[in-house]
Amino acid sequence: MDTLCVPAQAQTLAQASELLRQGQVVAFPTETVYGLGANALDEAAVRAIFAAKERPADNPLIVHVAERSQLKGLCEVTEAAEKLMDAFWPGPLTMLLKKTEKIPAVTTAGLPSVAVRCPNHPVALALLKACGLPIAAPSANRSGRPSPTTARHVYEDMTGRIPLILDGGPCRVGVESTVADLTGPVPCVLRPGAVTAEDIAAIVGDCTVAESVMRPLKEGEAAPSPGMRHRHYAPKAKMTVYIGGDRAVARAICTRYDEAENAVILTHTSAMPLYGDRRVFDLGDTPEEGAHLLFQRLREMDEKGCELILAQGWKAEGKALAVMNRMARAAAFDLVQV
Ligand code: TXA
Ligand code: MG
């Protein structure tokens, strides 16, 4: 199959919408990462997403809508969910709600809940409106690769596998949406994103964070969200993440770097001068900048054939939890506090 990668504009949006209506898979930008979309109500179309991504069938997909009214008949929207939609939609908050029979089991990997989200991106919203369908869309990477934040990343992973990629430029947020389970009495964040547990609690009074967000699953432990079971965001290189003050982190990283072969450093912009002429990549200064840059940097470092990534992280809390959850997984939880 030939894969076209085209700028998103009126004509290509119409083409993408037509492909979606025919049950095909199309990649499109959202504010978080690029998505690999197909009709969420069409079993064969959803299976084609799993095939293109080589995604295990036990990992459910997020259903994207242009507006709340599209959820009618698809899931039970609770009062808390309504309030959170008022506050954060369109935006990077995915909610797990009880599903109805209209959503095929393949889409939710047989689970009784469905993940729903309204993305805040003009191209995603225009496409969702044009096709008028609820669109199941995981991140548009091949399974086990970092999520794509540019159309080029999607092309690298999906060429020959899907007919069309809509290019809408780089994604603003850079890490995937917050996934919050709203099926229990208190909302629980299963995957941290740009909407924090604190943001959610401010609207509905309370919100917990799944404990496994910052640690590996134990042998035989059930994952709160199936996606957490699978190896994620894994660069080819081995990676260690250091947390602490710039100088202490730089001392620890430089010692390790100087003993290693083919190592690279991924650090905060302000700390870069501490590393002299060593090979350094820029992760920005704030956790938001880090989130925006992380997946792109992981791909770049892999392309350069680096074998060891020595990265500076942030304390895993508040707004930094999203980027640290991804950094910790990329490093197989090799975290060092200095
Ligand atoms: O920002 C995003 O969320 C992007 C863009 C494209 O919208 N999508 C995305 O999808 O990251 P994906 O499939 O890569 O991640 C979805 C996560 C997975 O960890 C999956 O296990 C979890 O959401 N999930 C989906 N449905 C679920 C359900 N019913 N119960 C528990 N977890 C669910
Ligand atoms: Mg993904």
Image (cartoon, rainbow, N blue to C red):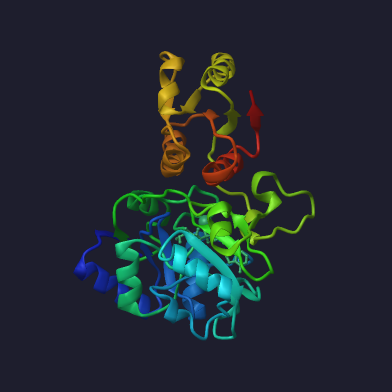
Q: Quadrant of residue 22?
A: bottom left
Which quarter shows the C terminus?
top right
Q: In the image, 100: left or right of 141?
A: right
Q: Residue at x 65, y 76 (%)?
A: 112
Q: Is residue 117 visible?
A: no
Q: How far across and how far down the image is residue 53, in percent?
A: 50, 60
**Residue at 57 percent of width and 52 percent of height:** 198
Position of residue 48 measured from the top left corner of the image (x, y, whole percent): 48, 70
Q: What residue is drawn where x is 62% and y is 71%? A: 109
39 or 312, which is in the foreground? 312
- Image position, residue 61 (x, y; %): 54, 67
What is the total number of numbered labels drawn onto the structure image? Answer: 0
Q: Residue 101, how many percent across, how many down? A: 59, 85
Q: Would residue 72 be visible to someone looking at this image?
A: yes
| Residue farthest to the right, as pictured | 220
Q: Quadrant of the N terminus?
A: bottom left
**Is 249 on the left or on the right of 31, as rendered?**
right
Looking at the image, residue 92 lies above or below residue 18: above
User: In the figure, 112 relative to 173: above or below?
Assistant: below
